[in-house]
Image (cartoon, helix red, strand yellow):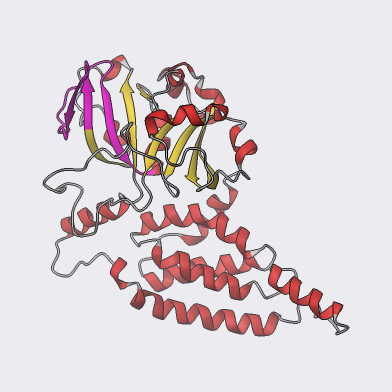
Amino acid sequence: TGVIDLVFRALLGKPRSLPVAMLRLFVPAVVMNVCISNTCVMSCLLTVIDKWSLDIGYSKAFFLLPLSYVLLISGTFATFSTSTNLIAQGLLLSSGFEGFSTFELAVPATVCTVVAMLYLMVISPMILRRFYVSSKGASEQEGKQKMATRRAQNRYDVRVQVTGRALKGESIASSGLLGKVAGIRDFLAYERYGKIQQHPGEELVLELDDVLWLRTNIEGVANLFHTAGVAFLALDLSDEVATFDPQSRDLIEAVLDKESPLVGHKIGHARNHHAEYECPIVAFRAFNGFQGDDSESVDTPRASGPEIGATPDRRLEAGDHIILNAPTTFYKLYKDSSHFVVLRKVAHGEADSADAHDSSK
């Protein structure tokens, strides 16, 4: 429903120091953890941390593992707070011993949680210092460029077609695409009348039916889904994506499990191995693929330029991330499937505006 995201974003704010940021995350998470399983709390906060870390300029690595430790410890607060407590309680009772009362472990759990929070606030930044953006001797502009590189982590390759007449004759820079879809970091290539030109500049003048290869973060993919004048093209070469009613479709992010029927097959042939899904692949990110480091700016990429990773000949592997243009029933049907390690909604067709409907996705 997005309630947790709204509540936590309001509570977390935009702290200026890492220890304060960690504290503002730990405290509400621990409070919620008293009543809910630590596994549920961690899974709910993953997307919150992903977005919030970008906003405040710190890598999510500073928060994910420390938060996991804090939740494991604070989860012992009440007997029902974690499965470990319940198992221990069951063993005590089955062995003839008196079990714990509901909050008997609350005091030691609280003390241990506070100590763990303080320890992690001090030690984690030291151990994880490699994730800092170094600003020594750097100008403010250089710092912004390095921050942009960090925000470009976890990027997806997507392929979109220019369908809106309002974009014809506009350059990439003047079209508003880069501003409206702020997640776009790399303009990899464009295809016009069957000819592909790699690494074009933002001064490229758009024509109707131009095909653009872009590399963007997950928010950028979601924004493209609702952007008028552009339409997703399937990476698995499915044709029916152009006929879909966007009101009845969702974007679903999936991490492939080794049991997935897609693993080992080329992206271009993927449709042959998941026809029952009824959803084309519209974005791809390789598992542990290189996506830039803190020493290079997105404004001054490697001399060879970023390469297209989601070609039809690319073979899918376990751990690869894909985004599917799926019917609204897909998530409910496959959320517990052994085909996927993770399955989550990225964008909802029901949220499409009139402009998005005109984009003829």
Q: Relative to 87, is 9 above or below?
A: above
The residue at 40%/67% (across/down) is: 62
Q: Position of residue 342 (x, y in %)?
A: 53, 48
202 in the magenta segment? yes
Q: Relative to 245, is 302 above or below?
A: below
Left or right position of 94 against 309: right
The residue at 13%/68% (across/down) is: 137
Q: Please indicate, yes or no, whether residue 102 appears anywhere in the rendered image.
A: no
Q: Position of residue 120 (x, y in %)?
A: 45, 77
Q: Please indicate, yes or no, whether residue 334 appears anywhere in the rendered image.
A: yes
- The quarter of the picture where the C terminus appears is top left
Identify the residue at the far left of this view: 303
Residue 221 position by quadrant: top left
Q: Nearer the viewer, residue 205 or 196?
A: 196
Q: Nearer the viewer, residue 54 or 158?
A: 158
The residue at 29%/55% (across/down) is: 150
Q: Nearer the viewer, residue 64 or 177?
A: 64
- The quarter of the picture where the N terminus appears is top right
Numbered range of the magenta stretch: 189-217
Q: Relative to 168, is 180 above or below?
A: below
Left or right position of 211 against 201: right
Q: Position of residue 148 (x, y in %)?
A: 26, 51
Residue 220 position by quadrant: top left
327 in the magenta segment? no
